[in-house]
Amino acid sequence: MEQRARVLIDCIDKKGLVYKISKIFYDMSLNIVSNQEFVDKESGHFFMRSVVTGNFSVKELQDKLNTITENSAKIRVVPPKKKNIILMATKESHALGDILIRYLDNELDANILAVIANRSNLKSLVERFNIPFIEISADGISREEHEDLVLKELGKYNFDYIVLAKYMRILTPKFVSAYEGKIINIHHSFLPAFIGANPYKQAFERGVKIIGATAHFVTNDLDEGPIIAQDVISVNHRFNWRDMQRAGRDVEKVVLSRALKLVLEDRVFVNQNKTVVF
Amino acid sequence: MEQRARVLIDCIDKKGLVYKISKIFYDMSLNIVSNQEFVDKESGHFFMRSVVTGNFSVKELQDKLNTITENSAKIRVVPPKKKNIILMATKESHALGDILIRYLDNELDANILAVIANRSNLKSLVERFNIPFIEISADGISREEHEDLVLKELGKYNFDYIVLAKYMRILTPKFVSAYEGKIINIHHSFLPAFIGANPYKQAFERGVKIIGATAHFVTNDLDEGPIIAQDVISVNHRFNWRDMQRAGRDVEKVVLSRALKLVLEDRVFVNQNKTVVF
Amino acid sequence: MEQRARVLIDCIDKKGLVYKISKIFYDMSLNIVSNQEFVDKESGHFFMRSVVTGNFSVKELQDKLNTITENSAKIRVVPPKKKNIILMATKESHALGDILIRYLDNELDANILAVIANRSNLKSLVERFNIPFIEISADGISREEHEDLVLKELGKYNFDYIVLAKYMRILTPKFVSAYEGKIINIHHSFLPAFIGANPYKQAFERGVKIIGATAHFVTNDLDEGPIIAQDVISVNHRFNWRDMQRAGRDVEKVVLSRALKLVLEDRVFVNQNKTVVF
Amino acid sequence: MEQRARVLIDCIDKKGLVYKISKIFYDMSLNIVSNQEFVDKESGHFFMRSVVTGNFSVKELQDKLNTITENSAKIRVVPPKKKNIILMATKESHALGDILIRYLDNELDANILAVIANRSNLKSLVERFNIPFIEISADGISREEHEDLVLKELGKYNFDYIVLAKYMRILTPKFVSAYEGKIINIHHSFLPAFIGANPYKQAFERGVKIIGATAHFVTNDLDEGPIIAQDVISVNHRFNWRDMQRAGRDVEKVVLSRALKLVLEDRVFVNQNKTVVF
């Protein structure tokens, strides 16, 4: 039966890899629809994303690919299916709303299992889209207690990614390591400028002429995880920091949705603290 | 002896191409430094640009690659060496000057053999860079007579590309077909908007908020050849058409130089009336 | 009582205007919060947008300003209040959804009175935001009959602007002249490139490297009305026309919302077939 | 005799300023060609740039304007004439070359009096443009000794601005305070990201997807002076830091030349550690 799969390879580079991989494709009569490769000379890593079609067993392809290189290689054969995601937010609706509209539009290759928020503001918006809204207030409890409640809730779902759509709380190392490489955040500045609190106020005070936003994977180094996508917008002396914030929202939502699309299409590989984006 | 070459392939797509090509690389113990592929489903064409290193004979590699596919395939093994270019201009110095500064800076992977112009304005500039300046005036002679003089001059040189750095005369089909796929032009508008004379005046009169420039290969359809690169810049109601022209020059020179760099690095394939840019 | 108003002036330019206007402000003890002026030398028109605060009567200010120049002058004193808008759409939700999310977010300085559509697709989305959705199908009736139904519906509302959020039907001159200068459209191309049907397909076939979107006032010259805002996004040979369309949607919605914000803040003056945007 | 002047005002904001200024213009029968104002609510400052024409004495206009506000006001009536600039550079030619080509093209509203460099690399380029090239080597002497030589050389010229076109030495507070508000620098990063040495290497290591450049006035806080202009360019995982550096040069030169143009047209006001750019 004709089917399609993404072949995703992240391994130590060595001569003959492309030959060995393409030989497997050839021997299995697969058609290569698209193919992108990158060798990072610094880390000595080889990255590849191929889309293949043909009459084949995913398991057989996976098994054959597993034989070509070292054990530490990450080789995945991914049939096209929607990924499951959980959204987390606080009170701003622009980034969340942008994802919801795309979702409704079938433009997002994902199922949204739930929205978890630490405030109630977004409940009405989310429920209009028939998505469960789970409010877990942080009032009166410690960061750790709050996170334990969130982790408990997350434990109920089988998901691929957590998307922080302007979730304004800092995650503890415990949380981050529980979902390493699975948490996507939108940072409201052009990282690494203006790390920390209220980047728009910092940007205003510095008198910059351009502001930006950065979508990245979350790691324990706050605001320092691998960058997936960035974009910018021009501002001028007429913008106070609230104007910058308003203008910045348009960039934030576009960058987060762009990064999410790239991740859902399996186009993003983490390469130490950077990304390879095909 | 360790050497490096670019392998450039443009042929009809068929199953097994990547396998056969990578097998040749593997059998010759070549290392793949970078590799990009694209299949155009509409035209059914396969495009590939690989950079390989190893201890090999260019001729042997070329011969082996020639066996893998049909006769109409364009397969080239290109050792890294500077290409030869001829610049043509009229009177504006921004695009020409930008190329000359890069040339002086060793940033341009090319030898500039000569600058041919139909006016004398740029003579002083060009000669400061120790490049032959050949003025071929069009005054008092027909377009055909003028072009014959230019073609005669061009015939003295062994060059890879002609770069029209704001050469403001229209080329005849005779000229274009003599150097098909070898003439790069910068058009002072965001094609296909504002085809024809004085695009900045047209843009001003239309009240656009963004202007642009387009670098393209020249074909007999005026302003209609395959686009290599484009970029834009914002304008507003305060710009008269001269201001737009001035602002546009910054885009023109950057886009032309970017396109030239892509062409000199063999990153541009012509695909019918489009380009594939790796 | 301290209040705030926007003073909007569009008149024939003559010496002393700024003096006379600022004298009125001074005599009435108004504070100028912001002030922007533009003189179009070609049309000989003077445009000004001032925001003033003070303890004043809007009528008195309007009356005084009316005395300073010719009868044809358009002088308006606009107290800050939400404008009323009607949205029109067909079946795509990205542009409409973007406006709805901003509306919910109180980011839009407008009341949305209704959404009129010629299909039913968007009914569910719109009603989630508690906004009347009026479907006026064009099936089985002539363009004129359909428009008469729409005009009749519009007649029920007291609105300032009609926003065509991907309304995919062509308006007749009758419709346009009924609401001249009050209809804002988003055109899915970087005008004036790719006028007409399916601009993304045209863009794909031309092989452009950048696509864009244009928000403009609607006039009887199809796709030729005064441009309010434009923006672009890069594409490459890997994009088929559907990919371009998808990528283009992000630009469309951002450009339309940006134009709408400018119009709602009274920052846009129509100057013949162009705009002055303060 | 009909003449033209720029009126530049930077003073403490108070009610009636625009009225008083426009009254002076009116009483002197001046025509306002263009006019831009800005009130910074935080600093309580009023900024204005008017271009006026008429039959007037510059001294008379200046005297009258001096009466309208407090003594600390900076009010200048500037007749249009070329400003004098000194360029300083080290060894890279892209930013310097871009300015030289514009100079030759009469696109720069300035006389270049000299180029001062701490290396000899650029001597040949500069002298081709018939501009004095003064090499002041820093070899074997202290920073202070070197600067004293530079300051001595600068003392010979009567100039308006110093343009650091990739001058790669840090200036001492003594130097900066000698020419406060008169030194324009291009910083090879999108400030405030990547302050300090080798921003491109920092950018590469951080894995950013966009790099930029910043033109700013030099103050004693290294890389912290008022920003005049910024721009960015996209990069991806295929760029090593040298590629980023090469790509960045295009942004650097465009941003520096744009900032220089703004300064030469008296469009830039310093507002504490920010700029107002009309």
Image: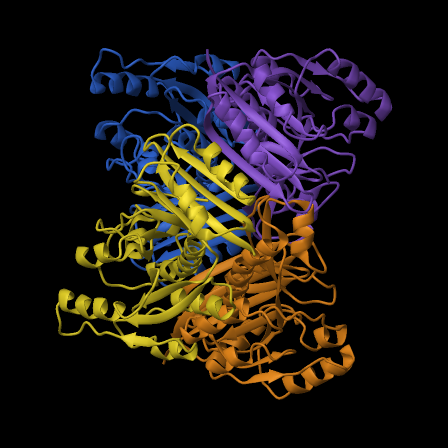
Chain colours: A purple, B yellow, C blue, D orange
Q: x and y percent of residue B204 in the render?
A: 32, 53
Q: Residue at x 43, y 16 (%)?
A: C122
Q: Residue at x 66, y 83 (%)?
A: D136
Q: Is residue A164 visible?
A: no
Q: x and y percent of residue C188 in the render?
A: 37, 34
Against B140, residue A5 (above or below) is above
- In which quadrant is the N terminus of chain B drawn? bottom right
Q: Nearer the viewer, residue C10 or B262?
A: B262
Q: Nearer the viewer, residue C261 or D60?
A: C261
Q: x and y percent of residue C173 in the render?
A: 22, 30
Against B120, residue C275 (above or below) is above
Q: Nearer the viewer, residue A53 or C33?
A: A53
Q: Give the total number of marks visible in the rendering.
A: 0
Q: x and y percent of residue A271 in the render?
A: 67, 38
Q: Residue at x 74, y 67 (%)?
A: D220
Q: Is residue D53 visible?
A: yes
Quarter of the image for residue D3 reads bottom left
Q: Nearer the viewer, residue A39 or D208?
A: A39
Question: In this view, which residue lies farthest toward the bottom?
Answer: D156
Against C139, residue A233 (above or below) is below
Q: Is residue A235 left or right of residue B156?
A: right
